[in-house]
Amino acid sequence: MKLEGKGKLLKIFIGESDRWHGEALYHIILKKAKEFGLAGATIVRGIEGFGANSRVHSALTEVLSHDLPIVIEIIDKEEKINEFIKVIDPMITEGLVVIMHDVEIIKYVKSRN
């Protein structure tokens, strides 16, 4: 599959300790993105940050190091991203941030494996 042109980058900011039905939320969202057939997704673990509740989460403090910031980045065409947002909307609860950027996809080629 070749994907080029205008697309969307979906970024979801959550905490490492956020759960959905007992499983890590970031892992559930990644599995759903794969099941949905989206072009790609990456999970990035931050070393420090704060969100809606203004509490700083940092790898520098042992007490909160189990709840470091997580950013999930997902890219695909706008239509597929918009449909995917509907799927994960029930999982995105208070204190979490979801943003979307316009992007120009230069090249995306699925590996032959």
Image (cartoon, rainbow, N blue to C red):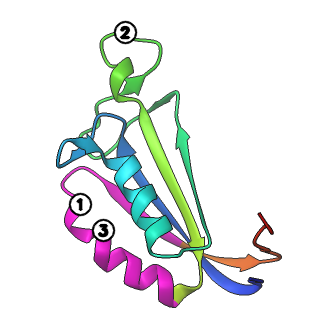
Image side of residue 34 versus residue 53, left or right: right
Q: Please tell me whether residue 61 is drawn above or below residue 106 in the rendered image.
A: above
SS for tag 2? loop
Image side of residue 108 versus residue 91, left or right: right
Identify the residue position indicated by label 1 in the image. Answer: 91
Q: Quadrant of residue 15?
A: top left
- The quarter of the image holding the N terminus is bottom right
| Disc 3 to disc 1: CB gap under 8 Å | yes
Q: Residue furthest front?
A: 113
User: In front here: 40 or 45?
Assistant: 40
First in residue order: circle 3 vs circle 2 = 2
**What label sits on residue 62 in the rendered view?**
2
Please provide the residue range marked out in magenta.
79-100
Q: Amino acid at mark 1?
A: Met
Q: Amino acid at mark 3?
A: Ile
- The quarter of the image holding the C terminus is bottom right
Circle 3 residues within 10 Å: few <14, some 14–19, many ≥20: few
User: In front here: 110 or 44?
Assistant: 110
Mark 3–mark 1 Cα distance, whole angstroms, equals 5 Å
Image side of residue 5 versus residue 65, left or right: right
SS for tag 3? helix
Circle 1 residues within 10 Å: few <14, some 14–19, many ≥20: some
**Looking at the image, is mark 2 or mark 1 nearer the viewer?**
1
Locate residue 99, reporting x and y percent: 44, 66
Locate residue 97, reporting x and y percent: 35, 57
User: In front here: 34 or 67?
Assistant: 34
Identify the residue position indicated by label 3 in the image. Answer: 88
Q: Amino acid at mark 2?
A: Glu
Q: Please tell me whether residue 30 is drawn above or below residue 1 in the rendered image.
A: above
